[in-house]
Image (tube, helix red, strand yellow):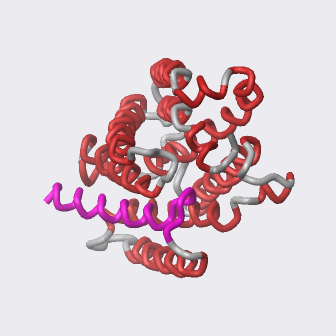
Amino acid sequence: MKLRLFALLTVWGVGIFGATMTFAPVLSKWASFSTRTGLLVVFGALWWAARGDHTLSRFRPVFFAYFTAILALSLGYFFGDWGLWLFGLTTQTPSGIAVAKFSQASLIVAGVLVTARLCGENLPSLYIRKGRLLLGLTFGFLAAAVCAILSLQHPAIKTLGLAKLAPMIPWILLFVVSNGFMEELVFRGLFLGRYKPLLGNWLAILSTALAFTLAHMQVSYTPDIITFLVVLLGLAIAWGWLMQRTESLWGSALFHAGADLLIILPIFKSLGAV
């Protein structure tokens, strides 16, 4: 029974995130609007119907998580260019890409937090809490440092040179910090605590990791998508484990930001920014 539920929740996650992620939309604007609206209606209705003593009541936290994720990601998708409009930037420069990521991430995070507040959820239910803070920050910082060292060995950085890289550093940091916190909140902060009573610790971690990884099948900044997805799955499992272990998202968000350093120049290159 638990494995069947694991499979069901994982398929839901892959389908929903694949259709609603902001970085590589697979649908036209109007098809995306219709799909997102339909998903919001379905999961909002399920969340409402599962109130009280009902056969669906044990799934109510999961329905809330899906509704909230779809709503927040849709805010980022449709309105996330506000930073570009405000500052007159384009995504053909490192500063424009970083501001675009911050703009999207800020709306997505706000969407999650406001929806949670309106629905009677609290910040600790999203893993926004102190938890084992010292352990989380220590592990996250060390992992991020290792990723930073590895990123300096990337051929693209050696070709670019440190003189050209230095002015990009503030924009790189803005990008990876914004993305790391946002994705840890949406993919794990929302779901791990709501999957855990249904699946247990490890199946909850694996389900969220698979949904996160397979949603990235759409990316275009890597020449070897299979290797990229295998590595990403390992990282996603590690981030889920760290969040559960420390009972907080701060360590995994820091680790995630560090890991994004490994792909930031390929992202810039794919958009013509370097």
Check the image and report above or below for 7 versus 93: below
State the extent of the magenta-drawn residues as a range: 1-26
Is 258 positioned to the left or the right of 271 in the image? Answer: left
| Residue 104 spot, x, y in % from top left | 66, 54
Check the image and report above or below for 177 versus 29: above
- Which residue occupies 64% across, 64% down? 75
**Residue 244, quarter of picture:** top left
- Was residue 19 drawn as part of the magenta stretch in this picture? yes
* Front residue of 22 and 240: 22
**Majority secondary structure in the magenta region:** helix
- Was residue 4 drawn as part of the magenta stretch in this picture? yes
- Using the rendered image of the protein, determine whether residue 17 is visible from the camera's viewpoint: yes
| Residue 252 spot, x, y in % from top left | 47, 33
- Which residue occupies 40% across, 75% down? 46
- Using the rendered image of the protein, determine whether residue 137 is visible from the camera's viewpoint: no
Is 198 positioned to the left or the right of 247 in the image? Answer: left
**Residue 58, quarter of picture:** bottom left
| Residue 6 spot, x, y in % from top left | 23, 56
Is 59 positioned to the left or the right of 148 in the image? Answer: left
- Residue extending farthest to the left is 1
Check the image and report above or below for 57 versus 143: below
- Which residue occupies 38% across, 61% down? 62
Name the image quarter holding the C terminus: top right
- Which residue occupies 41% across, 35% down? 239
